[in-house]
Amino acid sequence: MPKEVMLLRRLFMKLRYKYHYNLVICTLILALLGVLMIYSASSYSAKLHYGDSLFYVKKQAVALIFGIVVLVVGAKINLNLLLKAKWIIFIISVVLLAIVFIPSLGMESFGATRWINLGIVTFQPSEISKFGLMIFLAGYLAENPPTTFKKMIIPILSGLIICGLIILEPNMSITICVGMAMIIMLYIAGSQKKLFIIMLVALAVLIPILIILEPYRIKRIFAFIDPWKNPKAEGYQLIQSYYALGGGGLFGVGLFASRQKYLFLPFAESDFIFSVIGEELGLVGAIAVIIVFMILIFSGINVAIKATDRYHTLLATGITSIIALQSIINIAVVSGAIPPTGVPLPYVSAGGTSLVVFMFVSGLLMNIARSPKRI
């Protein structure tokens, strides 16, 4: 083998492992930061409502320990198994989402039925199913490139089934994340530009329809335009988020010193935890967190680009798309860049299912980055 080719190969392998380490480091930084900030954001409300200031932290810490285990599993698992089991994974994803609507098992909270209650544990199927769809699409599209409309029917139908069940919960924000990730995967897989444009137009038309169908979503739009018009109702949460971010200034009020966590900011430990980060750590801390996410996402993109085959490329694309879209939407919501919608910040927000699943897919990205074999 020529010396130049050997040098390029060595450089290529170094880059692959470099992104592998970036993925590990960024995942652990965000997960550990999440435990710390969940304690800060929830200690007062947890003590008030549950008599235990560590109520949310204990649950997140258990999820983190389990998450580290599944991260290792994801990094070591034979990716061929996921490819061969793609239909089983898709069917399980659909069944889990359907179980939510069984009265004895589905659990409702704040007007949404998104959890399955097994008595000793509750979990959110949509967190599992969105990545289940990505695994299925990666395997199917790798074997069946969507070069014609006929070849796109099954991928589109599978995405519509998953998105349809998620929107029925209802959960519009995750539905949009999954739908956009599916479109990105179809584009990367080689769909015709004409069909890709049609899908984008269809999504653009569908979003306003989904908003109109639910009156509370229209109210959220108006609250986004002028939250001070109704500061004690629809505009309340966004205003409190502004107070948190604005009050943090450049360097923040100090760790554990948030004022908004004293029942002023709803969902401070979950969907709006980035607001508490901005308040306590300031603009500098908030930017630092965004940079960690950017490194993680950039590493995922490079794993997809440097993957050894179509299946690895598409799997890395789907996983990275979900991480990127959900992170962008969450940060955009709490900063008032887009209308309010409930979506957790990956790895950081309170939620055991979310943390475990995101750590598992981080493991899958590491697996792809380290895999020299072709399928």
Image (cartoon, grey):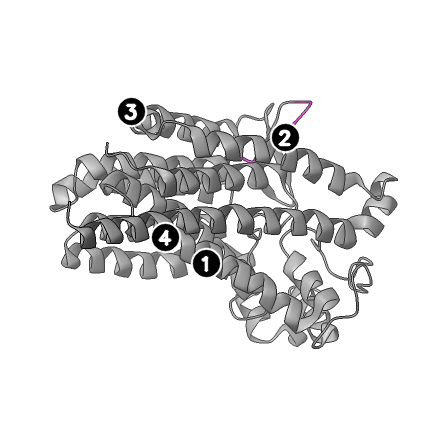
Whether 192 is drawn above or below 64: the answer is below
Q: Quadrant of the C terminus?
A: top left
Residue identified by numbered label 3: 84
Type of residue at label 1?
A: Ile
Q: Which residues are magenta?
A: 119-124
Q: Residues within 10 Å of mark 1 (few under 14, many from 20)?
A: some
Residue identified by numbered label 4: 15
Residue identified by numbered label 2: 122
Instruction: Judge from the rendering whether residue 92 lies leftward or rightward of residue 275; answer left or right.
Output: left
Disc number placed over residue 211 in the picture, else none: 1
Whether 265 is drawn above or below 372: the answer is below
For marks 4 and 3, the one nearer the N-term is 4
Q: Residues within 10 Å of mark 4 (few under 14, many from 20)?
A: some
Distance, label 1 to label 4, CA atoms, is 44 Å
For marks 4 and 2, the one nearer the N-term is 4
Disc number placed over residue 19 in the picture, else none: none
Type of residue at label 3?
A: Lys
Q: Locate residue 144: give its quadrant.
A: top left
Distance, label 2 to label 3, CA atoms, is 29 Å
Residue 102 vs residue 181, the one in the foreground:
181
Residue 124 vs residue 40, the one in the foreground:
40
Distance, label 4 to label 3, CA atoms, is 29 Å
Instruction: Judge from the rendering whether residue 166 lies leftward or rightward of residue 30; answer left or right.
Output: left
Q: Main secondary structure of the magenta part?
A: loop
